[in-house]
Amino acid sequence: MTDRATRVAPPHAPLLRRAAAALLGYAAIRALGLAVLAVWSAARGKDAYTLLTARWDALWYARIAELGYGYEVRLPNGDVHSDLAFFPLLPWLERLLHALAPLSYADAGFLVSVLASLAAACGIFAVADRLHGPRTGVLAVLLWAALPVGVVQSMAYSESLFTALAAWSLYAVLTGRWLSAGALAALAGLTRPVGLAVVAAVWTAGVVSFVRERSTKRTPGAQRSEHAFAARRGAPDSAHAPGASSLPRAPARTPGTARVPQAPGARPLPHAPTAANPPAPDASSVAHIPQAPAATPPDAPARRRVLGMLLAPLGAAGHVLWVGQRTGKGPLGYLDVQAGWRNGFDGGYAFARFTADKFTSFPSALAGLGLIAGVALLIRLYAACVRARQPAEVLVYTGVVLALALCASGYFGSKPRLLMPAFPVLLPLARALARLRPSRSALVTAGLAVTAAAYGAFWLNGSGPP
């Protein structure tokens, strides 16, 4: 089965116009979540805005923005929580907004998250629209907004900012904008440690493009096939600039072929198929050709690809090296800082033990079963992404995000929000919803939004992040 061909705007319309329905739906779901949070918090005698802007990591970010780095907390058990563990882009933006407008650092952090969440929603739509069409793009955005911990998207945290940078970097790679992809990857690397996933995606796309280019040069006739394949997928090449319509052009009229008169407003009649003038494929069938890795634009200069790849790791590497110099422990200094927070990468051993410990009593065993079911669902969704032949760079990005979130040894309550940037795993669900009738997909999405709003309010008024 294929996605429905319903389009919110013509495929050649500007991206922002095509994404309008997704952005409106996203704003509505987040507004519902904030409204429920406000009512729930008031009933418990708490301030919802304080929960969003002045607790947990939000306090660390605001302190860095105000006073810079250098603060640490020593716990009775010997652990040292240093603010060097936090990447600097969000505090920099908070400081900038505080200097430009009469906003506190907490207010600035909230504003950054709100704007970044909208940018992330638009970026998710752009990627999903590129791969599976606009209807899937809209539903992917709504599913991301309705995640159980979607309320974090409205907190003074860095998840929304990072997801926005990651999504747009992936879109830049898919459309052959290598310098933009590298610059956005560098900024993502200044936002969260998982910025490595964006760097890996850019490098994967670059390596694949060079391998494909070398293979094309060696194989006679392969370049023509490469151009045809790129045109079928809507990938930009010499005839399709980035962002242009992915629909095929009408076949050229052969000499001597008479035009058929048409009534005003009537749809153009196809020319009779001939060997020189084959029938044009149906638009919907072209839009839903099985997805394969996006073809690199044949006219993309190698130097641009190389420069994009070189730019990508500068953000993450810069912060890690600066922390190493600041601590006097060299390139591994950042790992020592994270160890003070009991964060590390152990291949999932600590998480497996944490899950196994849940089965020591009956009530907690239900939570253990829930954790196992959640991990199994993520694996199944990722396998569905592979079967759908998502581009290699998207698969690598998603895989690294999942691996870093599930196989880290840090605070296990934070894993749901650490998984939030792995939005491509939502694409199989969005495609499944796109096959339903609009009324049914709307009902499912509304149910998820209400559930997420209630859970988000309960979560923030309880244990909540970090």
Image (cartoon, rainbow, N blue to C red):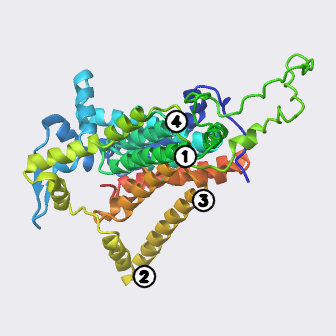
Kindly identify the amino acid type of the residue bearing the numbered disc 1. Answer: Arg
- Return the residue at label 1: 218
- Return the residue at label 2: 362
- Point 78% across, 39% down: residue: 281
Element assignment for label 2:
helix
- Point 30% across, 41% down: residue: 53
Q: Residue 179 appears at what percent x and percent y?
A: 39, 32
Q: In this view, does 167 lie above or below 460?
A: above
**Circles 2 and 3: CB distance less than 8 Å?**
no
Q: CA gap, disc 4 to disc 3?
A: 22 Å
Q: CA gap, disc 1 to disc 2?
A: 63 Å
Kindly identify the amino acid type of the residue bearing the numbered disc 4. Answer: Thr
- Point 50% across, 45% down: residue: 214
**Does residue 330 appear to the left or right of 345 in the view shown?**
left
**Does residue 79 appear to the left or right of 181 in the view shown?**
left
The front one of 217 and 114 is 217
- Point 87% across, 28% down: residue: 271
Element assignment for label 4:
loop
Q: CA gap, disc 3 to disc 1?
A: 29 Å
Task: Determine which quarter of the picture holds residue 67.
Answer: top left
Q: Residue 299 appears at what percent x and percent y?
A: 52, 31
Mark closer to the chain start, 1 or 4: 4
Asked if residue 190 shows in the view, the reply is no
* Residue neighbourhood size for the residue with mark 1, other residues' Cα within 10 Å, grouped as few (<14), some (14–19), many (≥20): few
Q: Residue 144 appears at what percent x and percent y?
A: 50, 48
The front one of 277 and 312 is 277
Mark closer to the chain start, 2 or 3: 2
- Return the residue at label 3: 387
Mark closer to the chain start, 4 or 3: 4
Q: Which numbered mark, 3 or 1, is in the foreground of this view?
A: 1
- Return the residue at label 4: 175
